[in-house]
Image: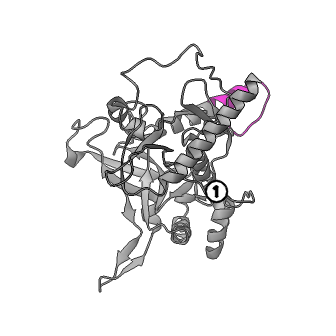
Amino acid sequence: MQAISVNLKMNSVTATRARTINRATRLSPCSVKPCRAFRGAIIIKPDKSTPSQRVRVAANAMMSMPSTSTASVEGFGDHCFKGAVAKKYLSKYGETDKLLTDASWPSQPGKADIVAKAVLDWAVDNGASVYCHWFQPMASSGVRHGLSAQVHQTMFEFDKDGKPFFKFTGEALLQGETDGSSYPNGGMRATHRAGGYLSIDPLSPIFLREDTVFIPAAFVSYNGDALDEKTPLHRAVEAMSKEGTRLLKLLGYEVDGLINNIGLEQEIFLVPRHAFYRRPDLQFTGRTIMGKASARGQEMSDHCMAPISRATTAFDCMRQIQMECFKMGIPLKTRHREVAPNQYEFSPLFGNVI
């Protein structure tokens, strides 16, 4: 009887709260302020012209995901220029997607112009009219704010009457030039003698986000010194392949080369927007440097197989991240909670480190 009584009370409270929320939609304009009693909620307080009452409602989601009745794998990799996506556009100019699998295509006469035309058609079909050479500048891995660099350029020119028309050449695709005076740190070299040179990386696929085409590139000085993080990676992979091939030959195995694979576990912390704006340390440093230490001894019974929280918008956020990666051809295979509060993880399939 005691258990039945408790259940009846809980159902009564739930029904009362539902009726209270329904009444909130009929209130006149009201003021909104953070709620201390309920995390992730707000208090709606009517103005003086309405009956005095306070209603608690759940905060609006930061982002919403479309809900479909039928699951589909259509659209995977549509925003990544390789495979079947590239084949569709390259075929218009007498080429196939196999052209992009040959890393020497940038040095083959006429091939860059063909790829540029195909990329332009693909970009226009997807609503993009801007391109950039995308690279990771020196010291981006944990020192600088922002792990990548880019200079956006429009993919159109102007005729003599001032009317724009789409144009994207092989020369613009293959290389770019930018100010290298701030690498490896600001003011180290005079601007007029600090050229930084961008060259396309044919081993990494071109991809698209929103209205911009991103062209993976390497960034070097006039003398070929690495000014980015990717050029040393390429050199390390080449050295590993060369010496690994030599070692295997001594062991009796004939191979053409070695490939480095990598599988990154992307662990993230998802903080509600209203909570983030109340934490200057998160805003200015990107990490927690003040406040009470988080639970570290599993006091909250957290574990890496717990259900993904629906109390906040974390689940919708993870779904949106997964959808964007799906369009760019990133094979995210797993998503789950992690042990720390508000910690989550994505795991993709293994792939080439380049």
In the foreground, 63 or 325: 63
Q: How many marks?
A: 1
Q: What residue did someone put label 1 on?
A: 77
In the foreground, 15 or 307: 15
Vertical placement of residue 261 versus 73, above or below? above
For the question of whether residue 232 can be seen, the reply is yes
Q: Quadrant of the C terminus?
A: top right
> Could you say which quadrant of the image residue 299 lies in?
top right
For the question of whether residue 148 can be seen, the reply is no
Vertical placement of residue 283 versus 154, above or below? above
Q: Quadrant of the N terminus?
A: top right
Vertical placement of residue 96 versus 318, above or below? below
Residue 35 at x, y percent in the picture:
41, 36
Coloration mode: one colour
In the foreground, 255 or 138: 138
- Magenta residue check for 5: no
